[in-house]
Amino acid sequence: MKANLPAKTGRTFEQWVTLARKGPGEVKGLVAWLKGEHGLGTVTATLVAHQVHGGYMVEHEDPDALLEGNFAGGKATLRPVYDALIKAARKASKEISVHPCKTYITLKRGTQFGVVKVARERIDLGLMLPGIEPEGRLEKARNLGNDRVTHKVVLTAKKDVDAEVVRWLKTASDQKAQPKVKAKTTAKAKTTPKTKTTAKAKTRTSAAR
């Protein structure tokens, strides 16, 4: 990921770290600053922020390596299915972010709404869909990440990532979307239009005097 930063952002990782030292003095604020002021993604901003403040967890140093680790061994053939799934997630919402871990991939939109677990012959897409009854391909989840993951969809081929999956992704992520604060609009002060004095009116006034 670090090697790709110059092409994607115009700065090297070291240059981002140097710039970030001028930002807020704590990790959370610095991540928000890097994202909001400089357009970095969540993973990159977090990596830079932890580098600035030190003591970051080693497993978060290289998200690309973590992602590849999920497809090690005989799981490599499922990578196209995963790529199709992430493309579908971004179609559901551009606010969705992907966070690879050692044995699974977390899906977030503000907070976590799903998890991707790669098995040898399938990908389990876990979703947080409270209040929705399991039906058809949307199965009840068991032991998939945590107890907040209520449903799962089994994916074995790219064709499994269809419009139905996009709809479920959107439903789950919409529940985790951060509410947008509307800017307050102030009422414009009404101005009393000035009465124009015409030349004729001036003449009549003078004559009356």
Image: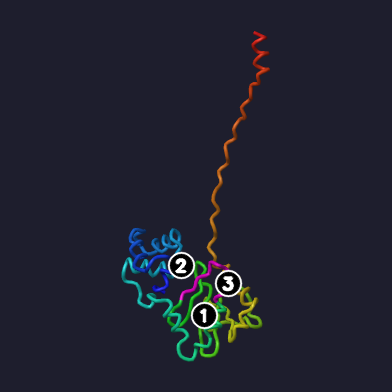
Where is mark 3, residue-wise? Answer: 172
Residue that numbered label 1 is attached to: 116
The answer to whether marks 1 and 2 mark residues whose Cβ atoms lie closer than 8 Å is no
Under tag 2, what secondary structure? loop
Q: Amino acid at mark 1?
A: Val
Mark 3 in CB contact with mark 1 (< 8 angstroms): no
What numbered label is drawn on residue 153? none
Mark 2 neighbour class, 10 Å CA radius: few under 14, some 14 to 19, many 20 or more? some
Q: Amino acid at mark 2?
A: Gly
* Residue drawn at point x = 61 percent, y = 80 percent: 161
Q: Looking at the picture, how far across and down is residue 165, in whole percent?
A: 62, 77
Q: Which mark is residue 41?
A: 2
**Which amino acid type is shown beneath numbered disc 3?**
Ala
Q: CA distance from mark 1 to mark 2?
A: 20 Å
Residue 74 position, x and y percent, is 49, 91
Q: Residue at x 31, y 71 (%)?
A: 55
Total marks in image: 3
User: Does residue 97 belong to the magenta stretch?
Assistant: yes
Report the residue that reaches farthest toward the top: 209
Q: Categorize mark 3 by other alpha carbons within 10 Å: few (<14), some (14-19), many (20+).
A: many
Q: Does 27 appear above or below 197?
A: below
For the residue labelled by badge 1, is the local secondary structure a helix, a strand or a loop? Answer: strand
Which segment did they paint magenta?
Answer: 86-99
Task: Note whether 188 is above or below 24 in the view shown.
Answer: above
Q: Is residue 143 above or below residue 169?
A: below
Q: Secondary structure at mark 3?
A: helix
Q: Earlier in the sequence, mark 1 or mark 2?
A: 2
What distance separates the C-alpha of mark 3 from that of mark 1?
14 Å
Between disc 3 and disc 1, the foreground one is 1
